[in-house]
Image (spheres, rainbow, N blue to C red):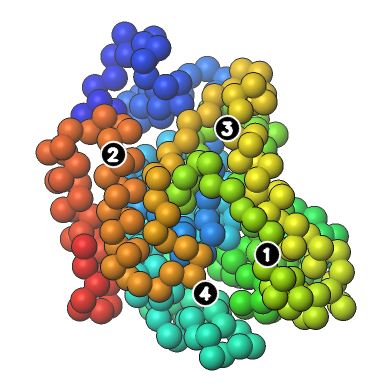
Amino acid sequence: MWLDELTSEDQACGEIPPVLREIALRKKNGQGSPNSRLGLVIEGGGIRGSVSGGSLVALSALGLNHVFDAIYGSSAGAVNGAVFLADQAAMGLTIYMEDLVSRRCVNPMRFWRIIDLDFIFDDVFRSIKPLDTNAIRQSDTNLHIGLTNVAGPTAEFLETGTFSGDILTALKATSALPLLYSKLVTIEGKEYVDGCILSPLPIRRAFEDGCTHLLVVMAGSRYRRKTPDSPVARMLTRLSIAPRHPGYARAFMDRWRVHNEVIDFMNDPSRLPPGTELHVLAPEIDTVQRATTDAEVIRSAVERSFREALVTFKCSPAEIDAMYDDMKESVREHARLAHTTF
């Protein structure tokens, strides 16, 4: 496998992207190049996070869970980062395919809380499929969880290396979708909602923290742009959010601008800080949307993102098939429904 066979010639070879060279160097030698800081940024977006989750399972299969100095994500991106750091990426896939698509979680008739995040974070992640939060705290890699502080509104980040509060509550806060979950999450006296409103893809934050090499794992095309909410959605925002939190309501309705700006930044190499490198894993998958509930559609997208990530790391077809078989077995071990399979 290329990652395990990196030679001094490979390290100097311009054909291997610098970020991938840095990853391979760390995997082989246990340390990176001098003065380097390697970051991982993960895109979320509701069920679209299953696509970036498939890529992360591939990175896990390559043994890359702990080569990064820091991981950044908001909403499902932060959740994916947590299960990846806890070496539970395959378990995370079963939550997308079983729990997040269940009527217990998503119920359009339950208009006061269409998506029940209490079920996901208070039941699934605590007892049904427990997230190993101790492993996250003990890791040398710091997970930066993006949040939107309603009071500003302002973008904030909780770092698992220094945050003494409950990690699952922080993950619920960054996932708290306005209009769909309709609750604010309180942490240390502050009220928070969906981190993607102001920090949909925390690339700039990673560079500000000193990252020199950045791997960005997308939940679809790297060129996907957002459009303004429909008139009905904007009316609901004005009626349900604006009376109490006008600033937060404006930020929520303008989140498409924030998303598109960071996409433009990511795709323009001339805007990157001097001396930094960025590499993007972005499968061209548009079949999974924020609220997709078709498990077969999710499974197909996950398989594709898994395989495409391994191709990026120059794995052979035989190696990819073998790792895919291992992934299927791991998913079966964590699944609680007999029909959940790859």
Q: Which residue is mark 2?
A: 310
Q: Cα distance, mark 3 to mark 2? A: 22 Å
Q: Which residue is mark 4?
A: 121
Q: Are marks 4 and 2 in contact (CB under 8 Å)?
A: no
Q: Which numbered disc, 4 or 1, marks the residue that appears first in the sequence?
A: 4
Q: Are marks 4 and 3 in contact (CB under 8 Å)?
A: no
Secondary structure under the numbered disc 4 in the rendered image:
helix
Q: Which residue is mark 3?
A: 267
Q: Residues within 10 Å of mark 2 (few under 14, many from 20)?
A: many
Which marked residue is nearer to the observer: mark 1 or mark 2?
A: 1
Q: Which numbered disc, 1 or 2, marks the residue that appears first in the sequence?
A: 1
Q: Cα distance, mark 4 to mark 3? A: 34 Å
Q: Which residue is mark 1?
A: 229
Q: Which numbered disc, 3 or 2, marks the residue that appears first in the sequence?
A: 3
Residue kind at label 4, given as amino acid type: Phe
Which marked residue is nearer to the observer: mark 4 or mark 2?
A: 2
Residue kind at label 1, given as amino acid type: Asp
Task: Locate residue 272, reporting x and y percent.
Answer: 64, 26
Task: Locate residue 264, reporting x and y percent.
Answer: 63, 36
Q: Which numbered disc, 4 or 2, marks the residue that appears first in the sequence?
A: 4
Above-or-below relation of 117 to 204: below
Q: Is residue 311 left or right of residue 274?
A: left
Q: Residues within 10 Å of mark 3 (few under 14, many from 20)?
A: some
